[in-house]
Amino acid sequence: MDTSKRILKLVTPWMIESGPEGDVVVSSRVRLARNIKDRSFPAHCSTTQKKEIREEIKKAIDKDKFNFINLEDISSLERENMMESHVLSPQIIADPEGRGVAIAKDQLSSVMINEEDHLRIQTIAPGLVLKEAMQRASQLDDELEQSLDIAFDENFGYLTAWPTNLGTGLRVSAMVHLPGLSMTNNLPRLLGAVNQLGMAVRGIYGEGTEALGNLYQISNQRSLGSTEQEFAKDLETAVTHVIGEERKIREALKENSKYFLEDKVYRSLGVLKEARLISTGEALALLSDVRLGIDLGIIDPKLKPKVQALMQIIRPAHLQKYMGNTLEPEMRDYYRATVIREELAKEG
């Protein structure tokens, strides 16, 4: 059941590994927004000013731990690939001039430069591990503050481009896989309850994006009025509630709709093994069903790392990088189906 070494090179480690509560929680992410004192926010900077800020930040980055990239120096496909890996935001990839990113060599931390704020420090890890992700982000933040004069106000906290990030500058989030809630149409009710707890629910790449493959991001909406630890604890409480509801529905489906569930899982696996053309959305939906089958013991759990890797490698930019060519949409659908078939054929 070995996953292709070529695929493993292109997939982020946290996407393949399973952490605590990994049947529901794919990953935990901590992001800190920071700005340099007496510098205009990126939206009000010229390209020259953005490049000056980028150079200042580059000097503060530990070159032994991070690889630094000027975004205008790489192709749009490379930038899209980083967006699909949750290193870059959809907003930054379209206008790369004067922007940059530093990526840790273990791929668990990154610093996005000159998006909405001068720095967006990010850590990401598999499973529900907000405390560990917070510690890692705080350590990186402290290291950068030793070299950079960060904008901070005694009354308002860290100054940011958007008022919603004012204070701690913190966004904590968890990516969750919710096929049970989706299948039983219980998702709107639960997500409404999560909103009532002060959390936002977004799609796979954040605000304004779709929830492909039943993957959702749950995050705090405020960053002012509490400590970083309190925000993380509040999110963990909300996510723990979501985990409980998803597991409850999964068990009910297994107990009361056993044959329906098995048929859905194996039918999805069958389509993936035989399809000749398949879109990103359809592939992620079917892989979501198979992942559910693995987590419920219907399918061999040894297949899980492969399914998780496929859920990333079949996205448009990853697929094109894997194939080594820019592909038209129909050819992407053809090669996506081919890659899935070839990988699942190694199952036995």
Image (cartoon, helix red, strand yellow):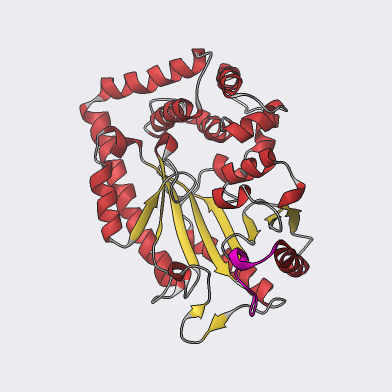
Q: Is residue 195 above or below residue 159?
A: above
Residue 148 falls left or right of residue 213: right
Asked where in the image residue 314 lies, by quadrant, the reply is top right
Would residue 56 be seen by someone viewing this image from the given angle?
yes
Q: Position of residue 135 (x, y in %)?
A: 55, 67
Q: Is residue 90 above or below residue 151?
A: above
Q: Which residue is painted at 62% across and 29% down in the image? A: 319
Q: Position of residue 308 (x, y in %)?
A: 52, 35
Would you say residue 192 sits in the magenta stretch? no
Would you say residue 43 sits in the magenta stretch? yes
Q: Position of residue 105 (x, y in %)?
A: 72, 52
Q: Which residue is painted at 38% across and 17% down in the image? A: 267
Q: Which residue is painted at 30% across and 53% down in the image? A: 241
Asked where in the image residue 7 lies, by quadrant, the reply is top right
- Quarter placement of the N terminus: top right
Q: Position of residue 337 (x, y in %)?
A: 55, 19
Q: The magenta stretch spans which residues? A: 36-46
